Image (cartoon, helix red, strand yellow):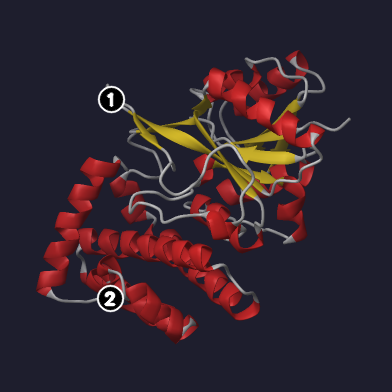
Amino acid sequence: MNPLLTMVVPCYNSEQYMEHSIDSLLAPGFDDVEVIIVNDGSSDGTEKIANDFEARYPGVVRAVHKVNGGHGSAINAGLQHARGTYLKVVDSDDWLDSKAFEAVMKRLRELRAEHLELDMLITNFVYEKEGKTHKRSVHYRRALPRNRVLGWHEVRSFWTWQYLLMHSLIYRTELLREIDLKVPEKSFYVDNYFAFVPMPHVKKLEYLDVDFYRYFIGRSDQSVNEKVMIGRIDQQINVNLLMVDALSRARQTMILPASLERYMIRYATLVSAVSSVLLLRDGTPGSLEKKSKLWEDVRAIDPNLDRELRKPLVGAVVSRSSWASNVAMRIGYHLSRVLVGFN
């Protein structure tokens, strides 16, 4: 019998922390879980560690070695090799909570026994921020009824800080293959793409209120570090525009449930706001020009969607180029860092 759940672990020069991550995927000793370690052309000891895990856990761990193609390329490779009914991506510096893992597997087994096909299982994630003793859990209790299969028509409004990030999601593997999901390669910040593009194709979802994913944040070389993000802003903008284009196509070719459409517009607005604020934080003439062009490109993709993205307060503020809007963006950015805990 094929595994019930595939864990894909993209690794690039991860020798210092990947063992902790992979150990957390193996600790429960489930025989219906497989772990695919994707070594994305690392130059350190990542390859050897991956091979050692494969040798120690034959039939459970598989090491996939490939030339460097970026985070999205590693996810694509993991999806290609996955045998599990469901698939979750776990970054190599993050880890999973063992008790929550037991609850997740129990529910997935129940769904299989009841012959219920779920497109997406949602769990909480926890910010494991460097130097912080209080660990903030992101949950979805307001928006999602718990512990039962839902349709989008039963989903309520999310709080402003609530988004279904990659850390929250377990997808049905065949759904990702049916839509021919190809995560952008040679790019960072593709986790937003992964958490966004499949949404219109998700018909059945369920929320399990457990703190499953532990999201480590705070390393100086991490992709979400502010200085690193500004240095890679072109990649952020590219993913931003791909998400806008995907939403535009979905609105034109599918009838989206109202709650899903509202959610996706808010998500696209947030990502556009992040791109805009980072460009403003850099403050160079070139970055300010890129900010203006970003919103011109959004309008070129879909004028109607552009108007929708500008309707919320955050969209109205970040899409403008004025002294007052720039000050408001800086204040909002600092408040978001305090309240939400990102980068």
Left or right: residue 109 compared with residue 232: right
Q: Where is residue 122 in the image (x, y as percent from the top left)?
A: 56, 42
Residue at 62% x, 58% y is 198
Q: Where is residue 323 in the image (x, y as percent from the top left)?
A: 10, 72
Q: What residue type is labelled 1?
A: His
| Residue 162, image x, y percentages | 39, 49
Q: Which mark is residue 100?
A: none
Q: In this view, does 16 lie to the left or right of 148?
A: left
Q: Which label sits in the foreground, 1 or 2?
A: 1
Q: Which residue occupies the foreground of this view, 165 or 52?
A: 165
Q: Is residue 183 placed above or below 255 in the rendered structure?
A: above
Residue at the image position 77 percent from the left and 59 percent from the top: 178
Q: Residue at x 43, y 41 (%)?
A: 141
Closest to the observer, 156 or 343: 156
Query: Circle 1 sits on which residue?
Result: 134
* Residue type beneath disc 2: Glu
The circle on residue 289 is 2
Mark 1 to mark 2 CA distance (whole Å): 39 Å
Place residue 126 in its image quadrant: top left
Secondary structure beneath label 2: helix
- Label 1 crowd bin: few (<14), some (14–19), many (20+), radius 10 Å: few
